[in-house]
Image (tube, rainbow, N blue to C red):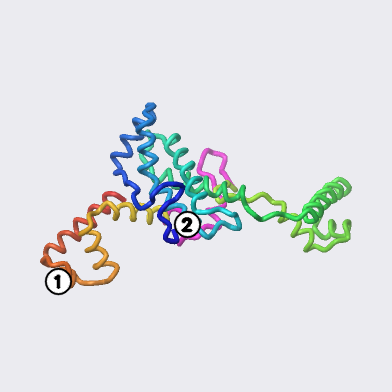
Amino acid sequence: MHGKVELSGVNTSRLTVLKSDEIQQLLERCHNGDKDAREKLIEGNLRLVLSVIQKFIGRSGGASATADDLFQVGCIGLIKAIDNFDLSQNVRFSTYGVPMIIGEIRRYLRDNSSIRVSRSMRDTAYKVLQAKEQLQFETGAEPTIDMIAKRLEISREEIVSALDAIQEPLSLYDPVYQDGRGGDSLCVMDQVGDSKNTDEVWLEHIALADAVAKLNERERHILTLRFYEGKTQMEVSGEIGISQAQVSRLEKNAIRQIRKNV
């Protein structure tokens, strides 16, 4: 976050973290009309919004979006997730909330993109569409780009560029195929997805970070020494002044807690 602590008046260094059972209880109260529970849910999940917007900082595709803008838009997605979450489904709130926050931010960036199509490009595109309709009416078949280029006396490249320029942005979640029998639809993301940087993998990273944040300071320090700095249990015991057996016990307990919360 480029060292920034405060976003939209919120001190991000002091954000609270709710446990899974606390979130479930607050959701139940919230859906029963408890406004105080709704506020606590929002405040207790702002760290989730913060985690999400880090993916978009500096990658806004030309939109003049600041970290404050993205944080506010992400909060709108969080509120929608809270209000629309289905308590009857056996799913973690973060699993539902993260895609909602991502979707809200992507819509904002798309609608506020600084990329503009020139007037001449739009005019060319509309002429191409008109010529296409005329040729289709005259021949009774779909005209080729070469036929349209000959009719308008412009190059193929100009036609392709003009048509591409007026295309609406395509969401990765847009369906491209459905079997018609009520099965799952095939989305654009399924065809062009990056297996290393999917929302699912990213969501796992967020869940892992949240789980680690719930450990006490000593357990986090031990895991850092063991798995980030590559030290042995004996080296860790000498550094923090406890026995190797204690290091082993604390390490196992920390990993158990992480697995429980992820």
Q: At x 15% / y 68%, what residue is drawn?
A: 237
Tally of numbered discs: 2
Vertical placement of residue 131 versus 77, above or below: below
Q: Quadrant of the N terminus?
A: bottom left
Q: Would you name the residue on which mark 2 appears?
A: 55
Q: Would you name the residue on which mark 1 appears?
A: 238
Badge 2 marks a residue whose secondary structure is loop
Q: Nearer the viewer, residue 110 or 127?
A: 110
Specify few, some or many for label 2: CA neighbours under 10 Å numbering under 14, 14-19, or 20 or more: few
Where is residue 20 drawn, in percent x and y?
30, 42
Q: Earlier in the sequence, mark 1 or mark 2?
A: 2
Badge 1 marks a residue whose secondary structure is helix
Where is residue 197 drawn, in percent x and y?
46, 60
Vertical placement of residue 155 versus 41, above or below: below
Q: Residue furthest top?
A: 32
- Based on the displayed image, in which of its 4 quarters is residue 38 positioned? top left
Q: Nearer the viewer, residue 43 or 151?
A: 43
